[in-house]
Image: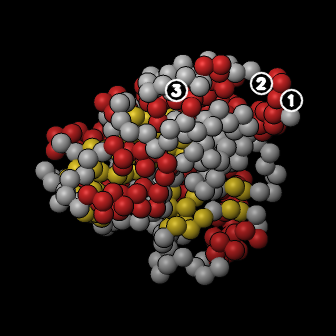
């Protein structure tokens, strides 16, 4: 049973007159995360306090925490700097035979599109873009597109423009039946929407850490199904090789890798400034509980949807969008100057495509939502 979480604004350095309803763009850092980062930067000022073991301890802690978030094992998680890096690993290791189709969604985030265009150019596969469904049922549209000639489906969990939701368990099962692979970008849902890799069974899954994961920029995580653990890495750095813990033996070059998905880790994964921040953020997310976070945010976006509908503003039905995310749709398009007018009152949302994204988190109060609608009522 999930329970709502009280407003956690005190954990964030957000002035009372700022309504940051834009977690889908970037989350603010919690005070403990900032403190962890500041302590980490100060530590780098005294490098004699950093031992060889410290190159491994934090990165292994972070790996384990992300594994818990998606119900994976630590050996199934690699540390990456970005979604594009993680998807490049996936593209390098997933077959895409000539004539096969690689499925993507209309208006999908570019980091999960460009790499597949390149892969298709390399192999002779083709990109098949699934049009936006008029009824917002992305799941049905994807299922209808899956056939024996599909090699890869590169998908999100929720669409980045408006939160359109995909039933990944159904899609994953259909892809496996067709003999196709599943590469997921969960950046717009990881940490706010429960996901179990044991049930979805993706081949690769990547998540950037600076949005719903409440962590720093330039650090993310990549889940790799064990059947690819012997695959080709993008880099050939020292720390992913066997016995790299022995600094005195690094000149004894080794062909063997560290176990599991670690061979796919980026170089300098130990990042002494960012890793402690990511650890602090993920610990808090797990302490709250992702299911409870989602329940809490779903109540907020349901209220936003109902109040918007009363003003004649549309959105996807609640059962076809992620609970933490709502995209507002205006008849005749987004009013000119709307975002600027909101910004004047220190109310921050974003426009992606034809959707105005309202993406709250636990730091938002009921007053933030009231202020949003006070402006919308005046503008409309």
User: Image point 82% across, 29% down: which residue?
Assistant: 47
User: Image point 47% across, 57% down: which residue?
Assistant: 111
Mark 2 neighbour density, 10 Å: few (under 14) some (14–19) many (20 or more): few
Residue under label 2: 50
> Which residue is situated farthest in the left direction here?
148
User: Image point 70% across, 74% down: which residue?
Assistant: 341
Q: SS for tag 3?
A: loop
Relative to residue 2, is residue 377 drawn left or right? right
Q: SS for tag 1?
A: loop
User: Image point 48% across, 29% down: which residue?
Assistant: 262
Where does residue 123 sit, x and y in percent of width and height? 26, 57
Between 268 and 358, the one lying in front of the other is 268
Mark 1 neighbour density, 10 Å: few (under 14) some (14–19) many (20 or more): few
Q: Are marks 2 and 1 in contact (CB under 8 Å)?
A: yes
Residue 98 appears in which quarter of the rendering? bottom left
Q: Earlier in the sequence, mark 3 or mark 2?
A: 2
Q: SS for tag 2?
A: loop
Residue under label 3: 253
């Amino acid at each position: 049973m999930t329970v709502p979480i009280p407003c956690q604004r005190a954990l964030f350095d957000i002035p009372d007159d700022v309504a940051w309803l834009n977690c889908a763009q970037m989350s603010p850092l919690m005070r403990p995360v900032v403190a962890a980062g500041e302590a980490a930067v100060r530590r780098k000022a005294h490098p004699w306090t950093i031992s060889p073991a410290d190159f491994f301890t934090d990165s292994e802690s972070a790996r384990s925490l992300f594994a818990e978030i998606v119900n994976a094992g630590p050996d199934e998680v690699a540390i990456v700097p970005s979604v594009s890096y993680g998807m490049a690993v996936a593209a390098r290791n997933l077959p895409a035979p000539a004539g096969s189709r690689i499925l993507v969604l209309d208006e999908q985030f570019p980091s999960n599109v460009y790499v597949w265009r390149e892969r298709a150019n390399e192999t002779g596969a083709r990109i098949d873009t699934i049009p936006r469904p008029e009824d917002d049922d992305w799941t049905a549209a994807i299922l209808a597109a899956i056939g024996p000639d599909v090699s890869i489906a590169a998908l999100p969990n929720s669409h980045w423009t408006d939160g359109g939701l995909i039933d990944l368990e159904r899609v994953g099962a259909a892809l496996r039946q067709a003999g196709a692979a599943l590469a997921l970008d969960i950046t717009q849902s990881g940490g706010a929407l429960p996901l179990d890799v044991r049930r979805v069974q993706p081949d690769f899954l990547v998540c950037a850490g600076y949005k719903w994961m409440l962590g720093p920029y330039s650090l993310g995580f990549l889940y790799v199904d064990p059947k690819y653990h012997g695959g080709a890495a993008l880099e050939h750095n020292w720390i992913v090789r066997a016995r790299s813990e022995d600094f005195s033996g690094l000149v004894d070059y080794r062909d063997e890798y560290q176990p599991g998905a670690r061979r796919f880790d980026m170089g300098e994964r130990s990042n002494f400034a960012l890793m402690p921040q990511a650890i602090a953020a993920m610990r808090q997310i797990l302490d709250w509980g992702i299911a409870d976070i989602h329940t809490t945010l779903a109540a907020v976006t349901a209220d936003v949807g109902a109040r918007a509908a009363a003003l004649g503003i549309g959105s996807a039905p609640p059962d076809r969008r992620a609970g933490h995310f709502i995209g507002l749709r205006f008849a005749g398009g987004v009013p000119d100057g709307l975002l600027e007018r909101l910004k004047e009152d220190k109310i921050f949302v974003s426009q992606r495509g034809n959707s105005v994204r309202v993406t709250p988190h636990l730091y938002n109060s009921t007053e933030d939502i009231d202020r949003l609608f006070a402006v919308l009522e005046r503008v409309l």
